[in-house]
Amino acid sequence: MYCPKCGENIEKDSNYCNYCGVDLETLSKKKKYKINIISVITYTILIISIVLIIYRS
Ligand SMILES: [Zn+2]
């Protein structure tokens, strides 16, 4: 895998970059958190749309 900060080729699943010392575990957690928020918003919109369709008919 490549370091998202410095772009060096580093070991897969390593917690820290050997070149720039960036905390990769924290970075990946932030990414997952963002994805979770997006999916929650998507599901909320989907549920609201379904409710609206049911009430309109
Ligand atoms: Zn790096």
Image (cartoon, rainbow, N blue to C red):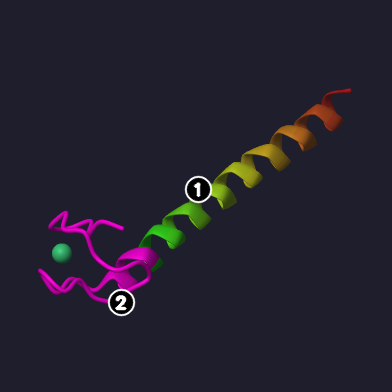
Q: Position of residue 48 (x, y in %)?
A: 70, 39
Identify the main secondary structure in magenta.
Answer: loop
Label disc, if present, on residue 15 of the rendered structure? 2
Q: Nearer the viewer, residue 38 or 4?
A: 4
Q: Nearer the viewer, mark 1 or mark 2?
A: 2
Classify 10 Å Cα crowding around label 1: few (below 14), some (14-19), many (20 and above).
Answer: few
Q: What segment carries the magenta color?
A: 1-28
Residue 27 position within the rendered picture, expressed as x and y whole percent measured from the top left: 30, 65
Which residue is more in the foreground, 47 or 55?
Answer: 47
Return the mark for residue 22: none
- Residue 38: which numbered mark, if any? 1
How far apart in space, not on screen, are marks 1 and 2 (Cα)?
25 Å
In the image, what residue occupies the spot 64% across and 46% down? Answer: 44
Q: Quadrant of the C terminus?
A: top right
- Label 2 environment density (alpha carbons within 10 Å; few <14, some 14–19, many ≥20): some
Q: Place residue 21 in its image quadrant.
A: bottom left
